[in-house]
Image: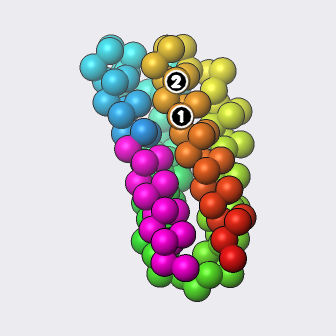
Amino acid sequence: MLETRIILSILWVALMLTYLLGDVLRIFSGDFKAGEIGGVQFTQPMWLGIAILMVIPIVMIILSLMLPQPVNRWMNIGIAVFFFIFNLIGLPTYPSAYDKFLIVVGLGFNLLTVWYAWNWV
């Protein structure tokens, strides 16, 4: 059903916008130090890993509209569960209330993605 594809795609857009909002707020609040995350100086391979990780939801926006239903369903479930666990583990490491709030909102988007994909018939 096309409607489910669109909903899944929109959920990935919402997740990406939530991640971007957190990054912007971190910069403007002064919680950001260039070249570091959590006080750790990052190398180019580490930044590449982050870029690969963060491009996955962007790719899922397109794949949710293009992949055949059975593959689409399981990719959405698997990747949303991965990001849910990844962010749940990282949640305690964020010092700011706005970061924790946005991570929880992102977790909600992940749960909705799993729910819509799981119930897709």
Q: Quadrant of the N terminus?
A: bottom right
- Residue 65 location in percent, x, y? 46, 75
Q: Which residue is mark 2?
A: 101
Quarter of the rendering containing residue 91: top right
Q: What's drawn in magenta, residue-wise?
A: 1-17
As drawn, the residue found furthest toward the left would be 28
**Where's residue 16, x and y in %?**
42, 48
**Which amino acid type corresponds to the residue marked 2 in the rendered image?**
Phe
Q: Position of residue 32 (x, y in %)?
A: 37, 21
Q: How many marks?
A: 2
Identify residue type, mark 1.
Val
Residue 63 vs 113, above or below: the answer is: below
Say if 72 sits above or below 86 in the image. Answer: below
User: How far apart are labels 1 and 2 at the CA level?
Assistant: 6 Å
Q: Tell which of 86 and 4 is nearer to you.
A: 4
The image quadrant where one finds the C terminus is bottom right
Q: Position of residue 100 (x, y in %)?
A: 55, 22
Tell me, yes or no, whether the two marked residues, 1 and 2, touch with CB atoms within 8 Å: yes
Residue 93 sits above or below residue 61 on the image? above
The tag on residue 75 is: none
Left or right side of 78 for 28? left
Question: Viewer-proximal residue, 45 or 69?
Answer: 69
Q: Which residue is mark 1?
A: 105
